[in-house]
Image: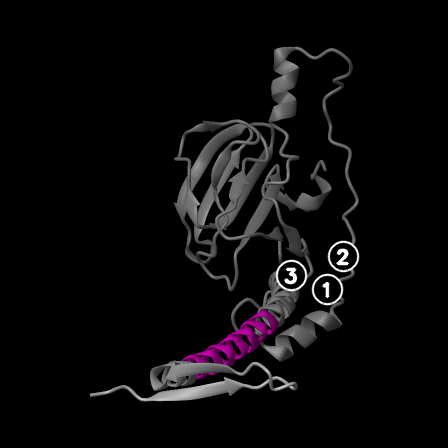
Amino acid sequence: MKSKYYTIQIIPDDSQRIKTYRVSTWWFTFLKIFAFILVVSIIAIVFGVKKGTSVLTNYENLKIANAQLAKKNANYEELFSRINSLWVLEERIQNIFETFVENDSNKVNSLIEKDKFAHTESEKIDVDFEGIHGWKSPEEHLKLERIPNVVPVIGIVSKKFSIQDKHLGTDLAATLGNPVFAAGSGTVEFAGKKEDLGNMVIINHHNGYVTAYSHMKDLRVTKGRSVTKGDVIGSVGMTGNTNGPHLHYVITKDGKEIDPEKMFNF
């Protein structure tokens, strides 16, 4: 098939020299295709630039959103920390009020009426060290070690010694499982379960003093064993008749109960 051609003439103003060009129709077809591709390419480039700008904008927005989320996360962590502190405070208040499980409002109100928070430290008594002054011999040191003046557990006084209320000991609220220490050196007279007092240890200090530690979770000593002041003899529990983890601590002197707080040597 013969190709078609177009004749193009360029005529100057003076019409003296006419230029003639013979162009195949395929060139026009090529120019159309090229123009189409050029237009499509320009559109694609414009669309790509627009999309890239949108991505950059979204990236900046994501950075801002991420910073806001990080700030909120920090606020949440602080809030959870405060909630945890409130939980610890509530647990301590429950220890003081002995409302560990039931949260009985009547019981709480009754304890408030007794002004439970107005805790005053018992008056200390002068321990008779039998004239021990200055340098002390081993025998004199032993006498001191046998005096039960160490606080037997790390906790707070939740119920005081009271002859009137027939509470002949001091309750020390503490965390379940915390160690219980021997208040003084001596010999274990009893280590086992005793009805409402639960797991219990009784230590004879061989100087008229006898100490008893009740409601313990477990015991670390046995009957007949010698213990030194500060030895771990068990852990805080809630065995026997009790509604929360605490140590019921009793001191007797020559068979008579005395206020343990008067012996504590802080």
Nearer to us in this view, 96 or 76: 76
Q: Nearer the viewer, mark 3 or mark 1?
A: 3
Q: Residue at x 62, y 34 (%)?
A: 148
N-terminal-most mark, 2 or 3: 3
Residue bearing mark 3:
85
Q: Is residue 227 above or below residue 14?
A: above
Residue under the image location 60 percent in, 34 percent down: 209
- Label whose residue precedes the other's in the sequence (3 or 1): 3
Range shown magenta: 34-57
Reply yes or no: does residue 72 show up in magenta. no
Q: Secondary structure at mark 2?
A: loop
Examine the image and state in which quarter residue 192 appears: top left
Residue under label 1, please give it. Answer: 116
Residue 42 part of the magenta segment: yes
Q: Nearer the viewer, residue 89 or 170?
A: 89
Q: Amino acid at mark 1?
A: Lys
Res 94 seen here: no
Which numbered disc covers residue 119?
2
